[in-house]
Amino acid sequence: MLGYTLGLVNQNLEKQAASMPNKPATMQGGSFSGPPKVLALNLAVFSAVQSGLTLAVKKYRGVEGNDDIPSNMAGMFGAGMSLSLCTNLVGDAPAAPGQTKPTTPAGYATDAVRTGALFACLNGAFMKVGQMFTGKNATTDVYYYHTNGMLAALGLEKYEKNFKRGLLTDDTLALLSDSALKEIKIPPGPRLKILNYVEASKKHMAAYAQTPPAYAQPPAQEQGTGLTHA
């Protein structure tokens, strides 16, 4: 619907420009121009591939949320490639000004990779800048300080979002269980590592608590000595 509407708008703009005495240059080529049906097809393919591929990459990487930059970049790369192939192979729209429309399989592949890389880089850059301004990329959270440290020590930093989504803050570390980690969608392998780390930490803290403080020990030179006073 959006693509078809934009196509109608483009047609009306071109008709108005054609009736002007000094006809300006118009964008008659490119992926986001052309008849309503062609533009609708391009946008439909772009949106479907972008959302589907992004979701698949997130599921493969075990992350959730809309602020994962690598997953979104992968989705935009695939969307850009599909948009390029759809534009070049379907319809007879001319190339955008200053560009040459490919005519060979190698040319199609090159243009697809170039377009996908451009879309991915722009998307990643915009998301990174947005995170910088919103503060979502802050590496320190007072409620997850020890949790983030544990995950970093185990090489499981990508599951920080899972802990935050499940509100498993630092004060819940000693209460972690397999079912709790499973509920926040952490795979079996990382679950075992986390539980083993927590159990080892508990034993270390218990041993430390049973050790008497140094000031409670009598001085070594006074032990076993009978001091007499004249």
Image (tube, rainbow, N blue to C red):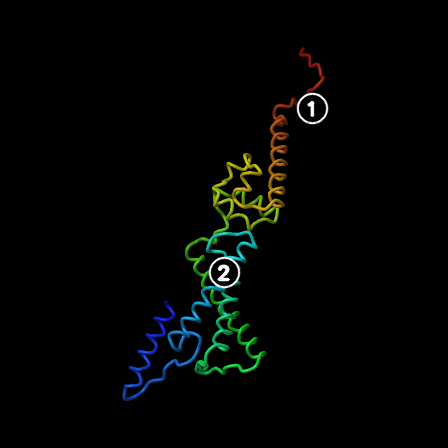
> What's the amino acid at mark 1?
Ala
Q: Which residue is mark 1?
A: 220
Q: Residue at x 49, y 67 (%)?
A: 79
Residue 93: percent from left, percent from top = 44, 80
Q: Position of residue 42 (x, y in %)?
A: 44, 71
CB under 8 Å between discs 2 and 1: no
**Which residue is most to the bottom?**
21
Q: Residue at x 64, y 30 (%)?
A: 207
Give the mark nearer the N terminus: 2 vs 1. 2
Query: Where is residue 110 shown, x and y percent of the image?
Result: 56, 76
Q: Nearer the viewer, residue 145 or 198?
A: 198
Which residue is outermost to the top?
A: 230
Count of numbered labels shown in the rendering: 2
Compared with residue 192, is residue 13 higher up or lower down, i.e. above or below? below
Badge 2 amino acid: Gly
Q: Which mark is residue 193?
A: none
Say which element carries label 2. helix
Q: Quadrant of residue 182?
A: top right
Q: Badge 1 local density, few (<14 within 10 Å), some, or many (20+)?
A: few
Q: Which residue is mark 2?
A: 52
For residue 224, side relative to residue 99 (left or right): right
Q: Which quarter of the image is occupied by the N terminus?
A: bottom left
| Residue found 30% across the figure and 88% down from its top | 22
The residue that appears at 56% across and 36% down in the rendered structure is: 177
Q: Is residue 100 left or right of residue 26?
A: right
Element class at badge 1:
helix
Point out residue 23 in the picture as x, y percentages from the top left corner.
Answer: 32, 87
Which of labels 2 and 1 is toward the front? 2
Q: CA distance from mark 2 to mark 1?
A: 72 Å
Within-10-Å neighbours for mark 2: few <14, some 14–19, many 20+: few
Please name whichever residue, 168 or 205, is drawn nearer the observer in this view of the structure: 168
